[in-house]
Amino acid sequence: MRIACFLKEAVLLFSEEELAMTKFNKISNRIDSFRDEMIDMQIQLSAIPAMSPKNGGEGEAKKADVLLKFFKANGFQTIDVIKAPDFDTPAGYRPNILAIYKGKSSSKTIWIMTHLDVVPPGELALWKGDPFKAWVEEGKIYGRGVEDNQQDMLASLFAVKAFLAEGLKPNFDVGVALVADEETGSEKGIQYVLNHTQAFRTPDLIIVPDAGNREGNMIEVAEKSILWLKFKTLGRQAHGSTPEKGINSFKAASFLVTELDNLYQIFSNKNRLFDPPISTFEPTKKEPNVPNINTIPGEDIFYMDSRILPEYKIEDVEEKIKKMAKNVEKKFKVKIDLGEAQRAPAAPPTPAKAPVVSALKKAIKEVYDKDAKPKGIGGGTVAALFRRAGFNAACWAKLDETAHQPNEYCVIDNMLGDAKVFAHIFLQD
Ligand SMILES: [Zn+2]
């Protein structure tokens, strides 16, 4: 009698939080049981080189078909394919899949968005094996696309599958978005979806696991503006022995390169959210000028990659650059043409206290025992497209950052761990 009484009290003492905890343990164990299945699917997906036509590929339609089968087999209630027309692909379109797994409430959706496309393998001789025949070695899967972005694509799919297998419901609807064209501008990917659907709502949590670090403690919420400029300097060609008869465009351009370094002093603000915490202005690409040593080059082309803190206006940076170019034109009697190769003003940052950031922090602490911090980065991520459209999106994943490299790999434990982070968020209030 006493025991029964005690038991009853013990049952009553189970708090909501403890119940969520046992649910999470079940889900977590279930995700572990999917390990082999997830590896198999990685290998299967890597065998379909989903490169965009701009990268010499056929697009993502075949890969999308394989994934659609997964959604159909695993209880997703709504599966939409938004097709962006593309007549450079055999299918004639680029697929964007939005799959919804119903939760207890539909008042908001927890979105995980990953991309279907992969970049070309690059120099094959640098690979230890065939990039499109993924292989497993010491806890890692090697192959093109396995980390970028299949690791977290499969993490999102199997996090949901674990709920189905356990007969549990997420607290809110879960949206799995698999988009095309991320590697070549997103025009036929998420930008197309944002322009042609009303799939996303303000209270939704939008997670883009396409940026991160080894520790898994970086939540990307902000970015710098990007400005890529082409400098074409025109002088006059002459024989190398008679420079006075020409105007050395390369010399003038070199002078300009050193002038441009002053931008670091002019735009010297520090912002601790970013790493590095400053704006950067770096000369990068150089086009060949003359093929032989004994000619004074009459034309010179170089490029500069600038990453500008969001507190500065791109226009103000441009104005200073134009002034510097004018001075060099006068000094060397050259003509300098400025061309824009890319101009991407920073999107409004996702606030460091946005619900998507708090949800990620909580889950990362539970799964990886890490205190994750919101951060800004220098490169534009696809999350910026959400931010420009008025949604708070956060990028996070635990990655070794091997994307786009030869011997790209995915740490299998990261794939499982990230699935648990997503599952944890699906159980949060
Ligand atoms: Zn990516």
Image: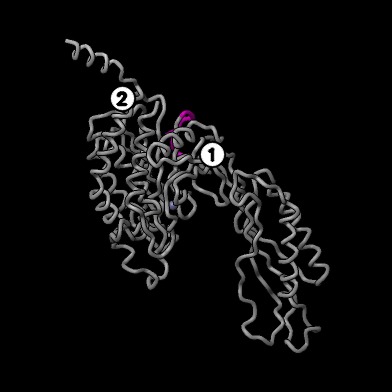
Up the image or down, 422 lies above or below 294; here it is above
Q: Secondary structure at mark 2?
A: helix
Residue furthest left in the image: 1
* Residue 249, quarter of picture: bottom right
Quadrant in which the C terminus appears: top left
Quadrant in which the N terminus appears: top left
Residue 142: x %, y % from top left: 33, 60
Q: Is residue 37 visible?
A: yes
Q: Is residue 179 rendered to the left or right of residue 6? A: right
Q: Residues within 10 Å of mark 1 (few under 14, many from 20)?
A: some
Residue furthest bottom in the image: 241
What segment carries the magenta color?
A: 196-203
Q: Is 198 a magenta residue?
A: yes
Give the main secondary structure, helix, strand or loop, of the magenta stretch.
loop
Up the image or down, 50 lies above or below 103; here it is below
Q: Is residue 396 rendered to the left or right of residue 159? A: right
Residue 107: x %, y % from top left: 40, 24
Residue 283: x %, y % from top left: 65, 64
Residue 242: x %, y % from top left: 78, 87
Q: Residues within 10 Å of mark 2 (few under 14, many from 20)?
A: few
- The residue under label 1 is 387
Q: Is 44 a magenta residue?
A: no
Up the image or down, 195 lies above or below 109; here it is below
Instruction: Give the foreground label among 1 and 2.
Output: 2
- 163, 346: nearer the viewer: 163
The amino acid marked with disc number 2 is Leu
The amino acid marked with disc number 1 is Arg
Asked whether disc 1 touches disc 2, contact meaning CB atoms under 8 Å apart, the reply is no
Q: Is residue 200 visible?
A: no
